Image: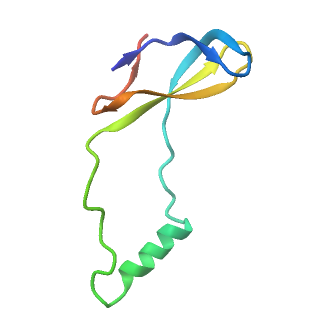
């Protein structure tokens, strides 16, 4: 899926439609140091057998997100593009 570099969208801070620059959203990978991750490792580590297994269902497609940054006030808004899709987003040159 291809998107343009600049889009005219509503800015809640300016309270009007302004030009926004479009950037791809990329989430940071989990560090593995969170409380839930540490607890899960502890449960899987023991000698009692399989206490807590892997996730049975793997999602095939993701919901693509873009970050819209207002050119006037530099306020950033997240926007979900369409429904679940296998195709990655690309920014058109």
Q: On the image, which quarter does residue 41 sit in?
A: bottom left
Q: Quadrant of the N terminus?
A: top left
- Residue 91 location in percent, x, y? 43, 18
Residue at 38% x, 35% y: name it. 63
Q: How is the image coloured?
A: rainbow
- Residue 67 location in percent, x, y? 55, 27
Residue at 43% x, 10% y: name it. 93
Q: Residue furthest bottom?
A: 47
Does 8 sit above or below residue 59? above
Does 17 sit above or below residue 58? above
Closer-to-camera residue (79/4): 79
Please state if 17 lies on the left or on the right of 58 as rendered.
right
Does 15 sit above or below residue 82? above
Q: How many marks?
A: 0
Residue at 30% x, 72% y: name it. 53
Does 9 sit above or below residue 84? above
Residue at 29% x, 29% y: name it. 87
- Residue 34 location in percent, x, y? 55, 65
Please state if 51 lies on the left or on the right of 34 as rendered.
left
Q: On the image, which quarter does residue 44 sit in?
A: bottom left
Please state if 59 lies on the left or on the right of 11 as rendered.
left
- Residue 11 location in percent, x, y? 66, 18
Closer-to-camera residue (44/81): 81
Please state if 54 lies on the left or on the right of 11 as rendered.
left
């Amino acid at each position: 899926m291809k998107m343009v570099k600049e889009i005219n969208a509503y800015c809640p801070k300016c309270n009007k439609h302004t030009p926004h620059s479009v950037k791809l959203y990329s989430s940071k990978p989990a560090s593995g140091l969170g409380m839930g991750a540490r607890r899960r490792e502890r449960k899987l580590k023991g000698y009692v057998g399989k206490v807590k297994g892997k996730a049975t269902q793997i999602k095939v497609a993701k919901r693509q997100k873009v970050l819209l940054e207002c050119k006037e006030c530099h306020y950033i808004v997240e926007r979900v593009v369409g429904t679940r899709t296998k195709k990655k987003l690309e920014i058109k040159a």
